[in-house]
Image (cartoon, rainbow, N blue to C red):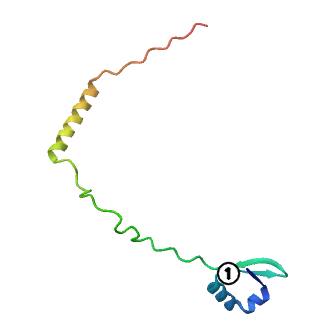
């Protein structure tokens, strides 16, 4: 990593930026000998994610339509309705009354 004064950087700004980009080595800019800014190269762009998994998976068939036929759905609905009716006819269990303790 190299260092340069702020005045030198101001005079040669574009050349320094190009050198950092080309060599990928950071430059520290100092003011009165004290480092205060670090010029670093940008990370290289990440590979494009879109389409990265192409060809990795295969389709298992139709995932949109129902696995049950209309007849099976209606039978399921009737069964569910019958269960609901049985549940509604059952008596609700009552909670036991609490006894108060005598003082």
Residue in the foreground of this view, choosing between 19 and 97: 19
Number of numbered discs on residues: 1
The structure residue drawn at horizontal position 44% and vertical position 70%, both measured from the top left corner, is 49
Q: Which quadrant: the C terminus?
A: top right
Q: Quadrant of the N terminus?
A: bottom right
Residue 88 position within the rendered picture, expressed as x and y whole percent measured from the top left: 28, 27
At a point 17% along the width and 43% down the height, the residue shown is 72
- In the image, residue 9 sits, relative to residue 34, either above or below, namely below
> What residue is at 23 percent from the left and 55 percent from the top?
65
What percent of the width, then of the height, locates residue 67?
22, 49
85 relative position to 4: left or right: left
Which residue sits at x=62%, y=85%?
21
- Considering only vertical position in the picture, is 88 above or below 60? above
Q: Is residue 71 left or right of residue 42?
A: left
Q: Single out the residue that lies furthest toward the top.
A: 102
Q: Residue 84 or 4: which is nearer the viewer?
A: 4
Q: Residues within 10 Å of mark 1 (few under 14, many from 20)?
A: few
For mark 1, what is the residue? 25
**Which of these two is toward me, 52 or 94?**
52
Give residue 89's quadrant in the image: top left
Residue 102, by quadrant, is top right
Q: Could you say whether the residue bearing mark 1 is in a helix, strand or loop?
A: loop
* Residue 53 shown left or right of residue 65 in the figure: right
| Residue that lies at the very extreme toward the right in this rendered image | 32
Q: Position of residue 33 (x, y in %)?
A: 84, 80
């Amino acid at each position: 990593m190299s260092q340069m004064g702020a005045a030198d950087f101001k005079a040669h700004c574009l050349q320094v930026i190009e050198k950092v980009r080309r060599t990928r080595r950071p430059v520290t800019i100092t003011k009165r000998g004290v480092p205060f800014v670090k010029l670093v190269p940008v990370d290289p762009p990440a590979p494009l994610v879109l389409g990265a998994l192409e060809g990795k998976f295969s389709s298992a068939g139709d995932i949109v339509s129902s696995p049950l036929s209309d007849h099976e759905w209606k039978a399921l609905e009737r069964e569910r309705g019958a269960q609901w009716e049985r549940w509604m006819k059952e008596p609700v269990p009552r909670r036991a009354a609490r006894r108060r303790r005598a003082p």
